[in-house]
Amino acid sequence: MRNQSKYVLLGLMLFTLMACDVIEDIVEQDIDVPVTFVLDLDIIVPENAEAPNTPTSFFAVPNAIDVLNIAEVSDRFGTPEQIQSIRITNVQYEYRNFSGNVDAVLSGSFNFFGGSPNTEVFYPTEPVNAAEADLLGDRFNLNGDYSPINEVLETTTVFAVGYDGLTSHNPVIVGVRLTISVTVTGTLNIDDL
């Protein structure tokens, strides 16, 4: 009977160890976390009283985001090493709080950049009357192939977005809000639970 007890105890120990490995394998699966966040940019084109109907170039100062600092991401993945990929899936933008010449039509491109060495990817926009778009609450899709900036996000969790182009009339002061949707894929570590 004593030998049977040893075998039963040994069997229970092996079962427990194997169960821990199975649980660890289940918990360390890759998971996708969809996240949406906003970036705000400001376009300021001063008045040119001598030529208010002259096309004028503008450049919105870039705004940067570290995806790891977004709560939904940092709560699930504590370190960049746990993140395997960040993929931009959708970008929308809208013009907000317009003031200035209501005939102003803006056209240009959003510039996504990041990584080392710095990679810059341009996404052109269609010409739009910014005052009208703000008044109507229009939202626009930023179409294009996101794979070049997604490649940058394979080596970093940080990227920035700027906007530059031309306005047909001046002055113009308007905010641009980008709503960016990404999917973050990573591995949960059993030790972090």
Image (spheres, rainbow, N blue to C red):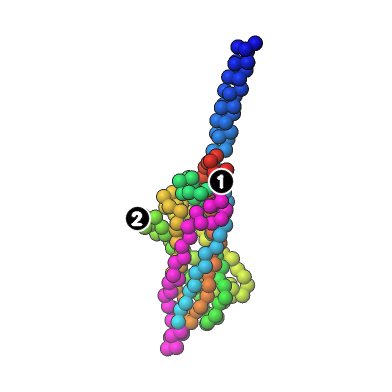
Q: Which image quadrant: the C terminus?
A: top right
Please name the residue shown 51% across and 56% down the image.
Answer: 69
- Residue to which mark 1 is pinned: 32
Left or right of residue 137: residue 60? left
User: Which residue is at the front of the view, 8 or 139?
Assistant: 8
- Label 2 SS: loop
Indicate the quadrant containing the N terminus: top left, top right, bottom left or bottom right. top right
Label 2 neighbour load within 10 Å: few <14, some 14-19, many 20+: few
54 drawn magenta: yes
Q: Which mark is residue 98?
A: none
Residue ranking furthest to the right: 1
Mark 1 crowdedness (10 Å alpha carbons): few <14, some 14-19, many ≥20:
some
Looking at the rendered structure, which numbered label has been put on residue 117? Answer: 2
* Span shown in magenta: 47-76
At label 1, which amino acid type do we have?
A: Asp
Residue farthest left in this picture: 117
Q: Position of residue 32 (x, y in %)?
A: 56, 46
Q: Residue furthest bottom?
A: 50
Looking at the picture, which amino acid does disc 2 mark? Pro
Position in image of residue 18 (x %, y %)? 57, 26
Please identify the quarter of the rendering in which residue 133 is found: bottom right
Q: Earlier in the sequence, mark 1 or mark 2?
A: 1
Q: Quadrant of residue 137?
A: bottom right
Percent across and percent down for residue 158 are 45, 56
**Residue depicted at 57% across the width and 76% down the height:** 97
Disc 1 to disc 2, C-alpha distance: 27 Å
Q: Is residue 148 left or right of residue 143?
A: left
Who is closer to the viewer here, 43 or 4? 4
Q: Position of residue 34 (x, y in %)?
A: 57, 51
